[in-house]
Image (spheres, rainbow, N blue to C red):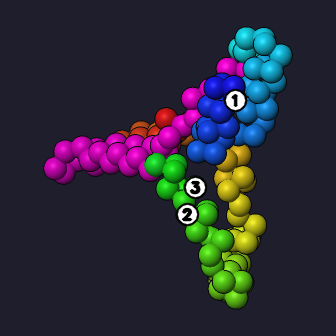
Amino acid sequence: MEERKTILDMVASGKLSAAEAERLLTAVETGTSPNSELTVARKPKYLRVLVETDEGGDGPTKVNIRVPLQLLRAGVKLTSLIPPRATQEIDSALAKEGIAFNVSQLKPENLDELIDQLSDLTVDIDQPKDNTKVRVFCE
């Protein structure tokens, strides 16, 4: 019973997706030990952006940005508080800028899917001519 409660608490806190919880609950109910497929992978907690450039002048410039993914989750939850008229105006303004995005379609479960995909994301941009290196990844 304690394992079930722990799994459900992890779902409630956003540490596990419903699909992961289902696999773990099945393993608990059948008495089997979770194999490598059932082991819960550590979810990324931060989106990191690192920029290093050496343009001469005063020496190298380094930028290290670490954005908590929980901030994104909170922001998505706040979108549900935006009045429909304001949402339409936001969507319209984005469309004028060439961004096809519908704010009202942004849901917490969609964000969890995106964050799951981000765990495999690593973007490296090297510009040897400018001596600039940019890395974007999740940790």
Circle nearer the N terminus (1, 2): 1
Spatial distance from mark 1 to mark 3, Cα to Cα?
A: 25 Å
Estimate how packed mark 3 is, as few (under 14), some (14 to 19) or many (20 or more) residues with alpha carbons within 10 Å: some
- Name the residue at 26% across, 47% down: 61
The foreground one among 57 and 88 is 88
| Circle 2 residue | 75
Amino acid type for the residue under numbered disc 3: Arg
Picture disc at residue 73: 3
Please, what secondary structure does the residue beneath circle 1 have? helix
The residue at 64%/26% (across/down) is 2
Res 53 quadrant in image: top left
Q: Is residue 21 left or right of residue 57?
A: right
In the rendered structure, the answer to whether residue 134 lies left or right of residue 95 reads: left
The amino acid sitting under disc 2 is Gly
* Amino acid type of the residue that numbered disc 1 sits on in the rendered structure: Arg
The answer to the question of whether label 3 and label 2 lie on touching residues, with beta carbons closer than 8 A, is yes
Residue under pointer 1? 4
Q: Percent position (x, y) of residue 19? A: 78, 36
Residue 130 appears in the picture as rendered: no
x 49%, y 45%: residue: 47
